[in-house]
Image (cartoon, rainbow, N blue to C red):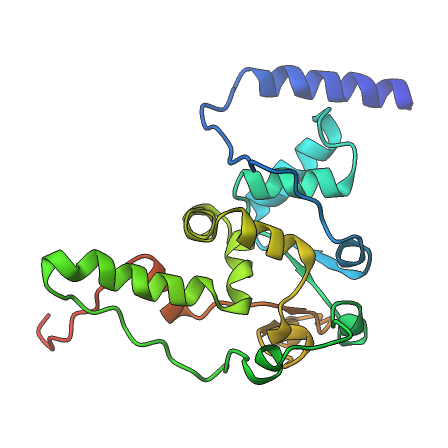
């Protein structure tokens, strides 16, 4: 059986080699590492079947991902969508001994609605956009942008930099482990009651610079 597996993996590598990627993945300027507790108690959530397929291929065939932490870091660098869900009983692993007053008082209200991005004078539009982006990126739950994949994670890396990626790899934000806010899979067919950070649709619209039309005309 091991020999058959080796032949299969070699064949799969040969097939994949016929389709080289022309996209250069994101790379950190400094070494990054996952919080070991995060990967030990967390549950990997992969909402996209194509992302699942790529991770399975890398796990079986890539020589540069010997561990799960290496595999997930590669997923981050390639902008694949995934998150790590945490159960309530494990929140204590992420809660510091001394919780800051800011973390105690500030949590993302699930009912809050982000003010829509509005058009301003052309010369002031960039400054207006950046002021909103900087406000969103500084929010504790913004780390989940890195796990949303695609252009959303690209925006997260662009405006949040390596620091936001490092936050994502360290675990959930205080919004989750202190305030129990964010996404919970309670509506799934087989819920495990896992918590992750969550961005609101309005926050994502602001990051993309979406300007809503207030006109009632079609």
Q: Would residue 216 be found to the left or right of residue 126 on screen? A: left
Q: Position of residue 13 (x, y in %)?
A: 67, 19
Residue depicted at x 72% and y 49%: 34
What is the x, y in percent for residue 129? Answer: 27, 61
Which of these two is toward me, 2 or 207?
Answer: 207
Relative placement, left or right, of 82 versus 130 is right
Residue 150 is situated, as x and y percent measured from the top left of the image, at 46, 46
Check the image and report above or below for 81 versus 59. Answer: below
Residue 210 appears in the figure:
no
Looking at the picture, tell me which residue is in the foreground, 166 or 83.
166
Query: In the figure, residue 91 lies in which quadrant?
Result: bottom right
Residue 3, horizontal then vertical, whole percent: 88, 18
In this rendering, the count of numbered labels is 0
Whether residue 108 appears in this view of the structure is: yes
At horizontal 60% and vertical 77% (from top left) the residue drawn is 103
Q: Quadrant of the C terminus?
A: bottom left
Locate residue 169 relative to residue 200 in the image: left or right.
right
Residue 8's image quarter? top right
Q: Residue at x 57, y 79 (%)?
A: 102
Taking the spot 36% from the left edge, 70% from the top edge, the residue there is: 202
Q: Nearer the viewer, residue 178 or 214?
A: 178
In the displayed structure, would residue 134 be above or below residue 82?
A: below
Location of the N terminus (image quadrant): top right
Res. 93 image quadrant? bottom right
């Amino acid at each position: 059986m091991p020999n058959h597996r080796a032949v299969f993996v070699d064949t799969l590598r040969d097939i994949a080699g016929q389709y080289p990627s022309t996209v250069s993945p994101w790379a950190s300027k400094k070494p990054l590492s996952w919080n070991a507790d995060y990967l030990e108690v967390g549950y990997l959530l992969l909402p996209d079947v194509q992302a699942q397929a790529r991770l399975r291929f890398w796990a079986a065939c890539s020589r540069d991902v010997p561990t799960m932490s290496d595999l997930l870091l590669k997923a981050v660098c390639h902008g694949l969508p995934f998150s790590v869900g945490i159960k309530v009983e494990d929140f204590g692993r992420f809660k510091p001994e001394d919780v800051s007053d800011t973390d105690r008082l500030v949590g993302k209200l699930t009912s809050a609605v982000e003010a829509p991005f509005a058009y301003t004078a052309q010369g002031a539009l960039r400054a207006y956009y950046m002021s909103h982006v900087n406000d969103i990126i500084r929010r504790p739950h913004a780390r989940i942008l890195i796990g949303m994949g695609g252009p959303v994670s690209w925006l997260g890396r662009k405006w949040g930099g390596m620091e936001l990626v490092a936050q994502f790899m360290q675990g959930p934000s205080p919004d989750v482990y202190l305030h129990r806010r964010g996404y919970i899979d309670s509506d799934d067919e087989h819920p495990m009651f896992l918590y992750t950070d969550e961005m609101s649709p309005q926050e994502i619209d602001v990051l993309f610079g979406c300007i809503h039309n207030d006109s009632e005309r079609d």
